[in-house]
Amino acid sequence: MRVVKLVANVTDACTAALFLIDDKKGDILRLRTFQSLCASVIADAGFPIGAGLVGWVAKTGKSTQTSHFKGDSSTLGYYGQDEDIKSFAASPLFDGDRVMGVLCVDSKKSYVFTDKMGKILDEFAETLVGIITNGRRRIRLNVEAVALQDLADIINRLTACETVSELSQTLRLAVQSAIQHDHLALALKSHDGESFHMIGTQEGMSAQPLPLNHYRLGWAIQHCRPINISYEDGVKAFPGSGLAWRSFIAAPMISHQHAVGAIGLISKKSRAFRQSDYKALQILAAACSSAFTSLYLHNKSKKAIYHDAITNMPTHRFLLEKRGSFTGPGAVLAVNILRFEKVNSKLGHDGGDEVLAEIARRIKSAVGPAGLACRYYGDKYIAFLDACEADGAVEIMESITHAVETEPYLIKGVRFNMQVSIGAALSPNDGKDTEELIAKANIAAQAAREQGGGKLSFFGSAPLSAAFKLRSLER
């Protein structure tokens, strides 16, 4: 499922997995889909509700986050061997008051899933419920509507759309061949969630507000119910439909038990729509609901991937997307905050986020116009420096160290100091590929960290001026 892949990307997980309760055996959780960097995931994993962390979430209906998982990861129930998992988070999926499954993510890095990431995972779980229930409804209706043999292809085309405009035009062309009609209307909820607007699906038709109380299409949205009626004198189907119609069918698009839009069809013929047409439109409405939800999640996940909300920094993925390699001299700096786990222990995750934001502000100020500072993950940052040789990289590294370490931090009435270890990789000496340079800079930062205290280090044997020697910056 594409949404689970989005979950893995947004959370930077090693594995993202969706478990659903077996319909035939109500006490068993089954792995339905997953996205993983590991080869040992058991594709057909299944275990009783209550077993392991995933089973506990299904049994209690409570979300969980484990920042430092210490057990054998095979105890999670979906790995065939220990994968050295260090962080885990899971959210239940509710169908009304009943748990229908669990969405979980894990990582080989400690302290990855913050409280805010847990909330994002809860939102994904809630959205998946709508997609799954709409999918199940679509399947049931498809079985009943035996004459709708081409619906599967139409739904595939709808779910492959990447923009609202593309989806509306695909819907118009698809319905044209599946259900005979004279005019199609598509209404969607606005971004502010306060009103509905018509989407231009016909040539010459522009977007316009849909007053719910004055049109039959609005009635379908208000009551979350499909409509199949013949002409009623003085009643309008939707804006622009006029009074010349003789038959009208409409189906709301439902997400989380609320209407997010509706599809309507009119015909100038009396009793133009068959029961199979009525059923087909409901199936298409369900498919459109899932497609619009996926588009919303896709756009939201892209924002989350490229922008870090805690530090108001771009992420390193933003740079990888915009520029995959250096074209000349440059440097990548990996900035590691030392002993940050003590900050979380003393101040909690909210206080830790404040510290991360303040450190980000200092790093951005230290880098200045020489490059771009980014959030990597956890307590790590990355700086990209263009047209920078080794000596210039040293100056920026010292500037970052001074900015982060010199002034104390005052958070929630607690005053303390922080230290950093910084590693650097140079282009073209260490390569030109940006992702490769990030990896090498992190290796250098880890080497500096292992020397104790605040250290600077270069990857490999980069040529340095006589003025620079690897040295301790301990205070």
Image (tube, rainbow, N blue to C red):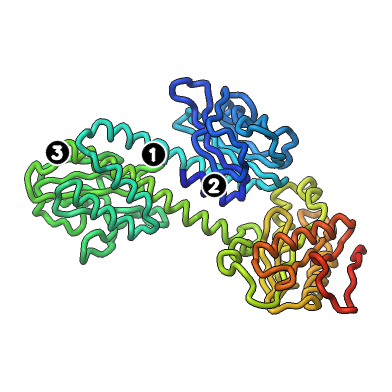
Query: What number is the disc on residue 21?
Result: none
Count of labels shown? 3
Residues at marks 1 and 2, CA–CA distance in whole angstroms = 22 Å
Residue beneath the point at 31% across and 57% down:
197
Q: Amino acid at mark 2?
A: Val
Query: Circle 1 is placed at which residue position?
Result: 257
| Residue 223 visible at all | no
Query: Circle 3 is placed at which residue position?
Result: 274
**First in sequence: mark 2 vs mark 3:** 2
Q: Is residue 467 left or right of residue 244?
A: right
Q: Nearer the viewer, residue 446 or 187?
A: 446
Residue beneath the point at 39% across and 57% down:
162
Q: How many residues crowd mark 3 within 10 Å: few (<14), some (14–19), many (20+)?
A: few
Percent position of residue 263, x then y: 26, 49
Query: Circle 2 is placed at which residue position?
Result: 7
Residues at marks 3 and 1, CA–CA distance in whole angstroms = 27 Å
